[in-house]
Image (spheres, rainbow, N blue to C red):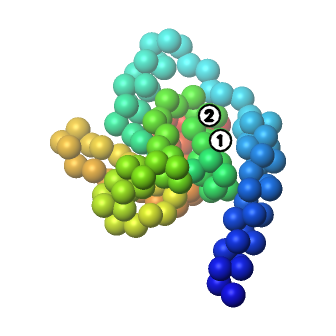
Amino acid sequence: MRSIIRLFFRTLRLVLAPFMLISEKMTRGSALERSPAEQAKVDAETANLALYQFSTCPFCIKVRKRIHQLSLNIEQRDTQHNATHRQALEQGGGRVKVPCLLITHDDGREEWMYESDTINAYLQQHFGSSV
């Protein structure tokens, strides 16, 4: 029974994936515009961030929309199709759950932030204006 349920949800995800990705592109809104100097400063600050995610996760889509709206250049690591990223997420964060934002502090300390609302609040607080 369990395998039938898994098969059902995998098939459903496969069918809905293109629609989810198109919807993401159509509804993500406009990007925040900054001066080249301000954007360079933000790019330097986001160099220490990485988003562990996969393409059709609704919560990951929510975070990627916020990243786009704030014009952030954050590395996105696909944990669904890349075993290395999946293993790094499990070892570093303690669990395989997406989205997860890896924040590497200046002192080398790593902070693993889960939950889309928490990640979006962090991004808004550190990089946002009135978006």
- The three-letter amino acid code for the residue at tag 2 is His
Are circles 1 and 2 on residues that touch, CB within 8 Å? yes
Of the 4 image quadrants, the one containing the C terminus is top right
Q: Is residue 25 above or below residue 112?
A: above
Instruction: Kindly state the secondary structure of the residue where label 2 is placed.
Output: helix
Q: Residues within 10 Å of mark 1 (few under 14, many from 20)?
A: many
Q: Is residue 42 visible?
A: yes
User: In this rendering, would 126 be left or right of 27?
Assistant: left
Q: Which residue is mark 2?
A: 68
Question: Viewed as shown, does residue 115 lie left or right of 12?
Answer: left
Picture coordinates of residue 73 (x, y %)? 49, 29
User: Element type at marker 1?
Assistant: helix
Packing grade of label 2 (10 A; few <14, some 14-19, many >=20) is: some
Residue 92 vs residue 115: left or right? Answer: left
The one nearer the camera, 28 or 20, is 20
The residue that label 1 is drawn on is 65
The x and y percentages for residue 57 are 64, 55
Q: Position of residue 94 (x, y in %)?
A: 34, 66
For this view, does 120 lie left or right of residue 106?
right
Residue at the extreme left of the image, as rendered: 107
